[in-house]
């Protein structure tokens, strides 16, 4: 393989490794197990959400609603538990909320033919409004079932369960996207919808699956967020929107250049959380993080534009 | 040979454009049936209707005597029709083997799960490609890096892979050099030899005269004439396409 190709495929990941070494040396406490587990926990939330966004983007659709859908699913869980519904049912309802939001986005894009950039902006706003409606503007806090909280705070041995769950989920979605017919159909639909359709692929189904997976990921992440914070508030996942997009876009600069891919998204999530964590440990001001995210988003797209441009300009 | 595909009065309008104004063609089983006509005559539109890419406004299609409606490309493929479109419609950023197996990916069971069998797809793709253009050997190469003729070969391989009864080729030699054209015509003959029914659209009268058993000439969305046997000379064809004369020569 040529040097150029190696840099194209692994450059960003190697830079991430460099960042890890840099922070290990210069940032106090970075290597403490408490900090590393904290980093991996943040990576768990971020990557779970970003996997969903990645699946939608693989089909050339943007899901700008996933963060607000995640917040909505969280308050649905909080609301049900606060009204004494059994927590497994509340969890199921939260996941179902994400699923239904994804299905709505999928139908808007494929049946109503509203471009995803617009339709998911709309559903994002609706989800946000509903979340405030359900909570009345305040957060659900209070006493939660310890079994439920275990999902967010429990450990198996020294390792938080959420990290283990994320690793298993990562392997499942990686297999789904790269080793199954459905995964290839999503990719073919995103690459050239007409070619895919003429090859007998149901491209509507593929787009709906992409957006449903995005909603589903938001619903699943909500469960762990609520269990971790033992509270549920509208906007609680708001920060994940830009972070999740940045992780996915950064991932597009790796492994299969210019294409959204699950492995890239995972490594992208690692890099972004490490950076944020490192900035805090190094005493940077809070606003530096936003500036950094903006730069990552712009640079990533400049490096690998094709699919994203197709998605954004499909208007 | 019995009639394999028959169309009656196929009409298709694009807004005010009358692309097809009643096309009726009988394609016989095991034959190479060419469809000719000037630019804009409606050839590709007719093919898209058989391929399920477009739906006719009126008219009937029967396959083996059974009335069929193709609401999607999937439906046409399932009825045993594989089509190579004029604009190829390949996913340029995907690999050769992924394009060849698009929509019909091979799987194998791993721990009970049906996972992609990439090794087998690459191997089979190489086999299909060997029949057409043995110089292409890297099935992982992206289609975007191929020449026009090589892309054509990928599109043809994709049709071969369906192992369909009926193969439709819309201008398969348009982008090709002399040697590649010969290869494609050889392939068309071998499809016939394998018992398949072939519909061939071409502007190249020499090619048509060389391989076709029967020809329908379209003019402004209608079929004006059907020729067979000894009438099939390149000169004759050019004459009919240009003049639009409807009388048989004899
Ligand atoms: N999607 C479309 N929208 C509007 N008009 C169309 C469309 N497709 C084809 N047409 C028109 O229908 C007519 C027939 O076009 P068609 O592509 O079937 O011709 P053709 O015989 O295949 O021509 P060529 O030899 O150039 O490939 C033309 O007038 C064309 O402009
Ligand atoms: Mg044409």
Image (cartoon, rainbow, N blue to C red):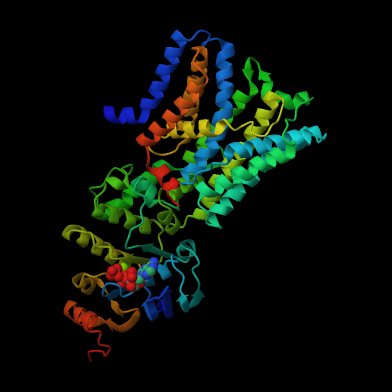
Residue B40's spot in the image, x, y percent?
30, 73
Residue drawn 80% across the image and 34% down it: A86
Residue B117's spot in the image, x, y percent?
44, 43
Residue A301's spot in the image, x, y percent?
39, 36
Residue drawn 72% across the image and 41% down it: A133
Residue drawn 24% across the image and 63% down it: B174
User: Relative to B239, is A291 above or below?
Assistant: above
Q: Quadrant of the N terminus of chain A?
A: top left
Residue B134 located left or right of residue A37 = left
Visible in this render: residue B49?
A: yes
Residue B223, picture quadrant: bottom left
Residue A165 located left or right of residue B166 = right
Could you say which is closer to the camera, residue A225 or residue A209? Answer: A225
User: Relative to B187, is A70 above or below?
Assistant: above
User: Relative to B12, is A103 above or below?
Assistant: above
Could you say which is closer to the camera, residue B50 or residue B220? Answer: B220
Residue A3's spot in the image, x, y percent?
27, 27
Could you say which is closer to the camera, residue A289 or residue A314? Answer: A289
Number of numbered discs overlaid on the protein picture: 0
Could you say which is closer to the camera, residue A252 or residue B15? Answer: B15
Residue drawn 80% across the image and 32% down it: A82
Locate ligand 1 by image quadrant: bottom left
Visible in this render: residue B196?
A: no
């Amino acid at each position: 393989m040529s040097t150029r190709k190696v840099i194209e495929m692994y450059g960003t990941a190697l830079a991430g490794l460099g960042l890890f070494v840099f922070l290990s040396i210069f940032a106090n406490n970075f290597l403490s197990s408490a900090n590393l587990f904290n980093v991996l926990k943040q990576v768990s939330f971020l990557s779970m959400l970003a996997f969903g966004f990645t699946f939608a983007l693989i089909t050339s659709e943007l899901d700008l609603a996933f963060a607000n859908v995640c917040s909505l699913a969280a308050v649905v869980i909080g609301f049900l538990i606060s009204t004494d519904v059994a927590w497994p049912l509340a969890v199921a309802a939260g996941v179902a909320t994400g699923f239904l939001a994804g299905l709505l986005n999928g139908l808007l894009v494929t049946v109503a033919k509203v471009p995803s950039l617009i339709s998911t902006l709309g559903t994002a706003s609706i989800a946000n409004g509903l979340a405030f409606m359900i909570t009345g503007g305040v957060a659900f806090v209070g006493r939660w079932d310890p079994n439920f909280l275990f999902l967010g705070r429990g450990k198996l041995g020294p390792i938080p369960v959420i990290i283990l769950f994320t690793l298993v989920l990562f392997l499942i979605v990686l297999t789904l996207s790269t080793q199954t017919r459905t995964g290839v159909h999503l990719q073919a639909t995103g690459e050239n919808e007409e070619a895919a359709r003429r090859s007998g692929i149901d491209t509507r189904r593929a787009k709906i699956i992409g957006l449903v997976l995005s909603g589903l990921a938001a619903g699943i992440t909500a469960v762990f967020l609520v269990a971790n914070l033992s509270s549920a508030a509208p906007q609680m996942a708001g920060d994940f929107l830009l972070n999740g997009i940045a992780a996915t876009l950064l991932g597009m600069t790796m492994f299969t250049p210019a294409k959204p891919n699950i492995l890239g998204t995972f490594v992208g999530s690692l890099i972004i959380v490490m950076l944020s964590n490192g900035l805090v440990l190094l005493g940077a001001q809070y606003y530096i993080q936003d500036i950094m995210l903006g730069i990552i988003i712009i640079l990533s797209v400049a490096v690998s534009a094709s699919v994203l441009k197709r998605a954004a300009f499909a208007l | 040979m019995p009639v394999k595909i028959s169309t009656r009065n196929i009409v298709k309008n694009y807004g005010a454009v009358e692309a097809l104004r009643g096309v009726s063609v009988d394609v016989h089983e095991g034959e190479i049936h060419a469809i000719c006509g000037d630019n804009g005559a409606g050839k590709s539109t007719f093919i898209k209707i058989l391929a399920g890419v477009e739906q006719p406004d009126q008219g009937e299609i029967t396959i083996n005597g059974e009335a069929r409606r193709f609401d999607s490309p999937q439906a046409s493929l399932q009825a045993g029709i594989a089509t190579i479109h004029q604009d190829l419609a390949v996913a340029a950023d995907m690999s050769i083997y992924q394009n060849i197996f698009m929509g019909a990916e091979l799987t194998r069971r791993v721990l009970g799960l049906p996972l992609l069998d990439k090794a087998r797809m690459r191997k089979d793709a190489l086999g299909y490609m060997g029949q057409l253009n043995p110089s292409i050997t890297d099935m992982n190469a992206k289609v975007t890096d191929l020449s026009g003729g090589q892309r054509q070969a990928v599109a043809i391989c994709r049709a071969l892979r369906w192992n369909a009864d009926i193969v439709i080729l819309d201008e398969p030699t348009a982008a090709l050099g002399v040697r590649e054209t010969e290869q494609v015509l050889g392939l068309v003959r071998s499809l016939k030899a394998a018992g398949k029914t072939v519909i061939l659209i071409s502007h190249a009268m020499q090619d048509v005269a060389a391989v076709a058993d029967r020809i329908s000439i379209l003019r402004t969305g209608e079929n004006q004439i059907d020729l067979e046997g000894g009438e099939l000379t390149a000169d004759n064809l050019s004459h009919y396409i240009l003049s639009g004369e409807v009388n048989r020569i004899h």
